Amino acid sequence: MDFLYDLCGLPFGWIMRLIYDWVDNYALAILVFTIFTKLILFPISYKQQMNSAKMQRLNPKMAKLKKKYKDDPQKLQEAQMRLYQEENVNPGASCLPMFLQFFILFGILDVVYKPLSFILRMKDDLIAKAFEVVQNINPDLAKQGTSLRQELAILSAHHDHASDFGEAFAGTDFSAMMTEFYDKFNLFGVNLGRVPELHPDVWNASSVVLFLIPFASGLLQLIMTIYQQFVQKKRNPDMPNMGCMNVMLYVMPVFSVWFAFNVPAGVGFYWACSSFFSMIQIIGLNMYFTKERVEKLCEKENKKLQKKYANGKKTLMQRMMDQQNLTEGQVKRQRYAEETKDMSRSELTKYNQQVLKDARRRMAEKYGEAYDSEQEKDSGNESNES
């Protein structure tokens, strides 16, 4: 797990250091960092929102397919894939932004846990030496400062017992640097390295701010969820009530509150900022992607794709369809071999005729043609007589 934090934390630690040097306050640095990441990810968010609008545009066609193939899930899946291919829609387009959000969250978590390494650029041996002092002056705090939380423990211990670090770091600017940074590692005077508590020992201004950060994060998530549901229902009144999915959407705000009560306040503050700017972005994109504009954009995109793939090159959805057909063909061949291995010659002939008959019926259904079973029967009899 530490490897994952380190992997995500290194690039974001470098970016946070640059921003911190510019704004000279850690909370403001997180705010600017959030805006920076939203701008970097905006093209992906734009494509995701565009894809969502295109999916909503297909809802009437999808409803017809579900009604037509309600008793045949396999045919329904094939028809849906063909529709996605024709309309150039990728149903899995929302996965990448979600993955990137978690990647950024892990990076921020590592940066908040390790301000001495990323912001002050202290060497590992200096941090280890400072933590030894923490173990001597406050063993209980040292136990809480294992692994990721060592640097926050050092920062807190130095603030409370600065004089105890004097002998170990005599002749250095360690104490001055730590004191200056602690004063800037705050939001409204609250240390962002502290973990919020539901039941703090003392209710003061600091504990109230810490207490409100997780709930601000959850509330913003909830508002964003309600807004998205409202927009989807307005654009698609016939949208079915997706019970389990709706429950999951409303569980996320609760998870945000729980999560923010278990990590340093700096992470919860980032999560709240991220939700706030995400909400502004979603509202703006929903206002931009009107029904008329989506139609024009789809028409323009389809023309561009037709020109791009005129030489026979296949789109992602076409390659997915080819792979699915290849897999289905392998399964059918394997099933055919197993079912016919013990058949006599006459049984095999009848079996092949039935397979051919079923295939013709499916083709007729696919292209909306009438299927004459009597004619098929006569054709089969003629072939038997010959």
Image (spheres, rainbow, N blue to C red):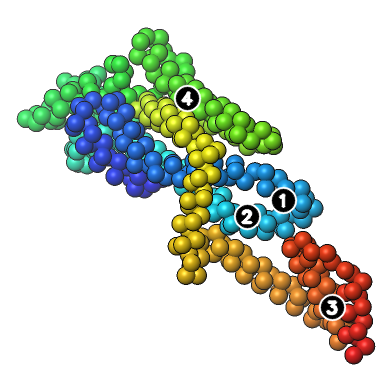
For the residues bearing labels 2 and 1, Cβ distance under 8 angstroms: yes
**In terms of depth relative to the viewer, which is nearer, 237 or 214?**
237
Residue at the disc numbered 3: 353
Q: Position of residue 18 (x, y in %)?
A: 21, 37
Relative to 258, is 356 on the left or the right?
right
SS at mark 1 in the image: helix
The image's mark for residue 220 is 4
SS at mark 2 in the image: helix
Q: Residues within 10 Å of mark 4 (few under 14, many from 20)?
A: many
Q: Residues within 10 Å of mark 2 (few under 14, many from 20)?
A: some
Q: CA distance from mark 2 to mark 4?
A: 36 Å
Q: Position of residue 140 (x, y in %)?
A: 35, 25
- Foreground label between 1 and 3: 1
Q: Locate the N terminus by quadrant.
A: top left
Amino acid carrying mark 4 in the image: Leu
Residue at the disc numbered 2: 83
Amino acid carrying mark 2 in the image: Leu
In terms of sequence position, does the residue under pointer 1 or pointer 3 come before the other? 1
- Foreground label between 3 and 2: 2
Residue at the disc numbered 1: 65
Q: Which residue corresponds to the image point at 29% horizontal and 25% vertical from the top-left? A: 27
- Foreground label between 2 and 4: 2
Amino acid carrying mark 3 in the image: Gln
Relative to 208, is 121 on the left or the right?
left
For the residues bearing labels 1 and 3, Cβ distance under 8 angstroms: no
Q: Position of residue 197 (x, y in %)?
A: 43, 20
- Foreground label between 4 and 3: 3
Q: Is residue 193 visible?
A: no
Q: CA distance from mark 4 to mark 3?
A: 63 Å
Q: Locate the C terminus by quadrant.
A: bottom right
Q: Which residue corresponds to the image point at 35% horizontal and 14% vertical from the top-left? A: 206
In terms of sequence position, does the residue under pointer 4 or pointer 1 come before the other? 1
